[in-house]
């Protein structure tokens, strides 16, 4: 199950590269608004969006490792962490598919004339809805990370205690800080995928630690 989740994240990262990756510095990319999607070609919008939409649900399979490792602390505690994280991944599908609508909307805005205030107002609303979705995902990620940390520190699990530092939000912060110093043109390709790169690192850490624990327990 862990391997399925890891492969799904890798494909999602590829979809991010296809969709909005471009030569830029990290800071340059982060300053771009959604309006910059107007210049995306149709094939990038379609392939990048739907490749991600297809595989993101399979990332949930990677959470099987988390459930297995936290299960000694109790099924309820383990499920609480997994379900909250899985729900965030479900919302990520909606967040990702919104790229297609937002990019298409901005293209329509410029094709009908940049003075089209109706379309521009509509795009501002789309941006707000998109941002709200991102906030909800972020809140769930913080909650699941806190539960993950508390469970590891306070209860017996298959994880060593230091794994509490390698929680989803913690890894996200580490990756973000490193990403900020990436120069042109690398930053413009890494920045769009840093959320999924963080997830990939989290899953790989899970797989390595759990395999080592199983090897220690069962001498295999």
Image (tube, rainbow, N blue to C red):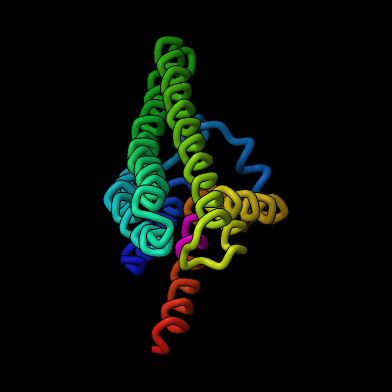
Q: Magenta segment, which residues? A: 199-203
Q: Quadrant of residue 126?
A: top left
Q: Quadrant of residue 59?
A: bottom left
Going 47% across and 33% down the picture, which residue do you hit?
134
**Which of the two residues, 108 or 143, is positioned nearer the viewer here?**
143
Q: Is residue 62 magenta?
A: no
Quick one: quadrant of the N terminus?
A: bottom left
Q: Is residue 146 left or right of residue 184?
A: left
Q: Is residue 205 left or right of residue 133?
A: right
Above-or-below relation of 164 to 208: above
Q: Is residue 201 magenta?
A: yes
Above-or-below relation of 32 to 78: above
Residue 50 position, x and y percent, is: 29, 47
Residue 93 position, x and y percent, is: 33, 41
**Which of the two residues, 218 or 11, is positioned nearer the viewer here?**
218
Residue 83 position, x and y percent, is: 35, 45
Going 43% across and 30% down the picture, which residue do you hit?
133
Farthest residue to the bottom: give it.
219
Quick one: quadrant of the C terminus?
A: bottom left
Going 62% across and 55% down the picture, which residue do you hit?
175
Specify the principal SS of the magenta part: helix
């Amino acid at each position: 199950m862990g391997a399925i989740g890891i492969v799904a994240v890798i494909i999602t990262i590829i979809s991010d590269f296809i969709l909005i990756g471009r030569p830029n510095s990290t800071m340059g990319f982060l300053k771009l608004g959604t309006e910059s999607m107007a210049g995306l070609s149709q094939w990038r919008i379609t392939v990048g969006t739907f490749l991600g939409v297809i595989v993101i649900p399979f990332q949930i399979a990677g959470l099987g490792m988390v459930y297995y490792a936290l299960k000694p602390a109790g099924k309820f505690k383990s499920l609480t962490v997994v379900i909250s994280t899985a729900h965030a991944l479900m919302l990520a599908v909606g967040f990702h598919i919104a790229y297609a609508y937002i990019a298409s909307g901005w293209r329509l805005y410029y094709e009908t004339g940049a003075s089209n205030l109706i379309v521009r107002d509509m795009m501002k609303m789309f941006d707000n809805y998109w941002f709200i979705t991102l906030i909800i995902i972020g809140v769930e990620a913080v909650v699941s990370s806190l539960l993950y940390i508390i469970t590891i520190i306070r209860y017996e699990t298959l994880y060593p205690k230091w794994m509490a530092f390698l929680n989803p939000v913690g890894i996200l912060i580490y990756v973000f800080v490193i990403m900020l110093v990436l120069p042109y043109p690398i930053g413009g390709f890494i920045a769009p995928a840093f959320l999924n790169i963080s997830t990939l690192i989290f899953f790989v850490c899970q797989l390595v630690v759990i395999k080592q624990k199983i090897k220690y327990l069962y001498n295999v």
